[in-house]
């Protein structure tokens, strides 16, 4: 795709997302969907997620154990009870009035907020 404007591209598992100054294009096996960026509602929320291995860009809030007692202490019945990071993720939610609705889990909460701000700035 050639254009004289700044564009953003996100490759998802089954879709490709192109973000242009005035539209968003989603290419999937079901076809191509085009949305006016002004019709797209974006919200950001956060979630704490336990990972085996934390992504490099995530904020680690604390740690837990693979096997935990009700009081939060490690269950000593398990010899190889691993300590696991609790990561702070962002959820980007996209919605339109035409029924498009999808969520993206972002390993860096700050990046999710920044992404929303970029889209809002493109709208202005």
Image (tube, rainbow, N blue to C red):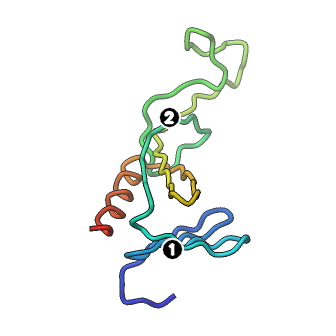
Could you say where residue 75 lies in the image, as x and y percent from the top left?
66, 14
**Residue at coordinates 43% horizontally, 55% vertically from top-left?**
41
Q: How crowded is mark 2: few (under 14 residues within 10 Å), some or many (20 or more)?
A: some
SS at badge 1:
strand
Quickly name the residue at label 2.
48
Tell me if label 1 and label 2 are in contact, CB under 8 Å: no
Could you say where residue 48 lies in the image, as x and y percent from the top left?
50, 34
Foreground residue among 106 and 99: 99
**Residue at coordinates 72% horizontally, 13% vertically from top-left?**
77
Which residue is outermost to the front? 97
Q: In which quarter of the image is residue 11?
A: bottom right
Residues at marks 1 and 2, CA–CA distance in whole angstroms: 28 Å
Foreground residue among 64 and 32: 32
Report whether 29 appears left or right of 83: right
- Mark 1 or 2, nearer chain start: 1
Q: In which quarter of the image is residue 27?
A: bottom right
Could you say where residue 34 lies in the image, as x and y percent from the top left?
54, 73
Foreground residue among 64 and 30: 30
Quickly name the residue at label 1.
18
Which residue is outermost to the top? 71
Foreground residue among 18 and 36: 36
Quadrant containing the C terminus in the rendered view: bottom left
In front: label 1 or label 2: 1
């Amino acid at each position: 795709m050639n254009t004289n404007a700044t564009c953003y591209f996100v490759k998802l598992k089954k879709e490709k997302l192109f973000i242009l100054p005035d539209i968003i294009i989603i290419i999937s096996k079901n076809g191509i969907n085009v949305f006016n960026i002004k019709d797209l509602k974006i919200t950001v929320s956060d979630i704490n997620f336990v990972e085996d291995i934390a992504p490099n860009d995530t904020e680690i809030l604390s740690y837990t154990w693979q096997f935990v007692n009700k009081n939060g202490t490690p269950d000593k019945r398990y010899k190889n009870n691993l300590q696991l990071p609790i990561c702070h993720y962002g959820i980007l939610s996209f919605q339109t009035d035409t029924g498009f609705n999808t969520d993206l889990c972002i390993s860096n909460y700050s990046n999710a907020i920044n992404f929303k701000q970029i889209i809002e700035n493109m709208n202005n």
